[in-house]
Amino acid sequence: MRLEHHYYELNSMHTGGRHGRFHIALRPDCEVYRGHFPGNPVCPGVCHIQTVKELTERLTGCRLRIRSIRLCRLKAVATPSACPELCVDISLSDTDGGLLVEARMADAERTYMDFKGEMTKEDTRTE
């Protein structure tokens, strides 16, 4: 399931070459929060990772698959009420057979996640 338009909305993006800065708004009405601490919703780390993947796909123009995660540091608890808008900075570099993706999800006050992983183009062939 794609999270854009459900879990978050993309407010703006600024890209140049191998770098992108994305401003997103978390959607407090998303069904994810109904099962993730109802009454005190917390953003699941797996949704942060999927958001980085989707934004990296926008940056590259390709469908991607996460090959490996070298670092995923959840540094602060994110909630749609405490941090309704986030900035996601993404930098790319080539690896053998893929892309090294370095990302940071933050607002003006704190960093919520640091991510470093390898992604590859999704194989779209059918057999």
Image (cartoon, grey):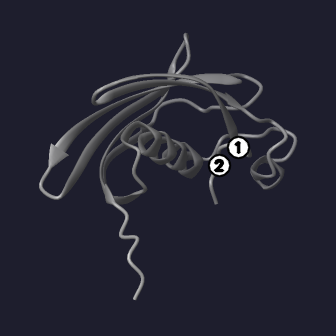
Residue 62 vertical position relative to residue 17 in the rendered view, above or below: below
Amino acid under disc 1: Tyr
Is 7 on the left or on the right of 89, as rendered? right
* Disc number placed over residue 65 in the picture, else none: none
- Badge 1: few (under 14), some or many (20 or more) residues near its Cα, within 10 Å? many
Between 113 and 27, the one nearer to me in the picture: 27
Residue lying furthest left in this view?
Answer: 96
| Quadrant including the N terminus | bottom right
Between 95 and 122, the one nearer to me in the picture: 122
Looking at the image, do the residues carrying marks 2 and 1 touch, with CB atoms under 8 Å apart? yes
- Badge 2: few (under 14), some or many (20 or more) residues near its Cα, within 10 Å? some
Reading the image, the residue beneath label 2 is 3
Residue 81 vertical position relative to residue 55 in the rendered view, above or below: above
Percent x, y of residue 89: 42, 26
| Quadrant including the C terminus | bottom left
Percent x, y of residue 92: 27, 36
Is 69 on the left or on the right of 94, as rendered? right
* Residue at (48% x, 39% y) in the render: 55
Q: Quadrant of residue 79?
A: top right
Amino acid under disc 2: Leu
Reading the image, the residue beneath label 1 is 7
Residue 16 vertical position relative to residue 120 in the rendered view, above or below: above
* Residue at (85% x, 40% y) in the render: 29
